[in-house]
Amino acid sequence: MIGRVDDAWARLAGQFVDGAYASVKGHVRTYVLHHQLLEHLPPAPAAVLDVGGGAGHQSFPLAEAGYDVTLLDSSQVMLDRAEERLDRLPTDAQRRVTLVRAEGENAGEAVGDRRFAAVLCHGVLGYYPEQPLSLLDELARCAAPGGLVSIMTGNAKASAVRPALERRWDDALASFDATSGVGVLGVQGRADTVEELSGLLQDRGVEPVCWYGVWLFVDWLEFSGVALDPDDPEQVAKTAAVELEASRRDPYRQLSRVFHLLGRKQPS
């Protein structure tokens, strides 16, 4: 992902790509975010920048849908996995993808000051010990006027969900006011609130337009000890459909362990 956790992702790439994304939760994440994005993206072949894009799970489906995708990541191991996955895409989609190695804080320079119709940053902010203001600066900088900025990150208001469902009651009690903890990959993580992140985007000329939840029922089931079968396509499809609907509605989206915030870059 981003530079300061590059060593950790070199170690965790296999677990992330082959484990997390191959699970039902991984499918739900890709499906839900993809459909939420399509509600706000301009038509293809608009240019999309995926900052901290890892192995391309979120942006490669956009390339298949006709978008011009630049995937930027600081981890060479993750980019190698992206290259492997890219080779499995249809040839026309492959031609629409560019891989760039750089830290997110240097995204603008790395892409030659190009401006994009959409800038994605999914599952990245939480791996910084403090709010990465310089990264937010770059996300806003790389978006064209009227362009979309899409951020997915942990929901600080739902921090007690996981320990409670795992019946770690002391941890759950302490989590109500916590913004950090060890995530499912065993890496220290940090969560945000929609309100705080919206304010930080506004400070950078990006006006929030909508937010969604991402994971709800799949989290409740997994952390309660229920095994979800990724090899049952009918059940996976039904699960994803329910998660997408829940992501749009209150109170469900408020209980999601992760949220997806979208904003538009205002004219300068």
Image (cartoon, helix red, strand yellow):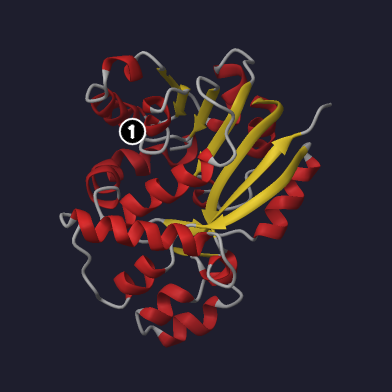
Q: 108 or 170: nearer the eye?
A: 108
- 154 displayed left or right of 56: right
Instruction: Look at the image and tell me whether residue 4 can be seen.
Output: yes
Instruction: Look at the image and tell me whether residue 183 can be seen.
Output: no
Tell me residue 78's x, y (percent): 33, 33
Q: Residue at x 43, y 22 (%)?
A: 66
Q: Quadrant of residue 120?
A: top right
Vertical placement of 160 versus 110: above or below? below
Tell me residue 239's x, y (percent): 32, 62
Q: Quadrant of residue 194?
A: bottom right
- 205 displayed left or right of 28: right
Find numbered disc 1 in the image and state the secondary structure of the residue it sits on: helix
Q: Quadrant of residue 56?
A: top left
Q: Residue at x 65, y 31 (%)?
A: 138
**Residue that numbered label 1 is attached to:** 78
Image quadrant for the C terminus? Answer: top right
Vertical placement of 215 versus 94: above or below? below
